[in-house]
Image (cartoon, rainbow, N blue to C red):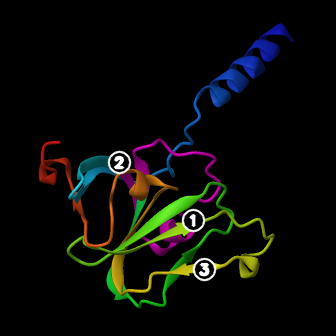
Amino acid sequence: MKVWFVLAVSALIYGCSSGIAAPQEGLPVIEACFVSAAGTVPVKLEVASSSEQRQKGLMGRTSLATDAGMLFEYSEPRQASHGFWMYKTLIPLDIAYLNREGVIGSIRHMVPCASASGSGCPTYPAGVPFIQAVEMNAGFFQDHGIRRGDRLNLGKDNCPAR
């Protein structure tokens, strides 16, 4: 009985010790950076490239590291009317919609949706055609001076020194 109690308490402490939710299992994580007039901001992005991975996105996460986010990749460009929603997403996020060259076409702020069904959640359309999107913690882009026209470089070797 004592062993089970120790194991249960240990698991509880371990589970609560990190404020950072684990990445989606099996998703690759890449180093990248946003490059703007304000400078270079390194980030670590989980890559969601399949329909299933993109659909799950950051659902259920209670937090993200300050330099962590998710890159959504599509094989074909999406229309400007295409957008994202926050169904079952627990933390506020900002999303940047990017073209094929990694240039940001628009940035939107998204808030968690408490609706029990996805149909009760608003969508956040890009407003521009895009082929990639990046979700980061709410306020990330503003805090780092990243705006429309700035770019995302994939791979640490493609990031200029800070």
107 or 157, which is in the foreground? 107
Alpha carbons under labels 1 and 3: distance apart:
15 Å
Q: Quadrant of residue 84?
A: bottom right
**Label 3: which residue?**
123
Q: Is residue 65 positioned above or below 16 on the image?
A: below
Q: Which residues are magenta?
A: 45-69
**Label 1: which residue?**
56
**What amino acid does circle 2 point to?**
Lys
Q: Is residue 7 positioned above or below 55 on the image?
A: above
Ranked by sequence position, the earlier of labels 2 and 3 is: 2
Q: Are marks 2 and 3 in contact (CB under 8 Å)?
A: no
Q: Position of residue 152 (x, y in %)?
A: 26, 62
139 or 128, which is in the foreground? 139
Q: Quadrant of residue 131?
A: bottom left
Of all residues shown, which one is farthest toward the right? 1
Ranked by sequence position, the earlier of labels 1 and 3 is: 1
Judge whether residue 74 can be spotted in this image. Answer: no
**Label 2: which residue?**
44
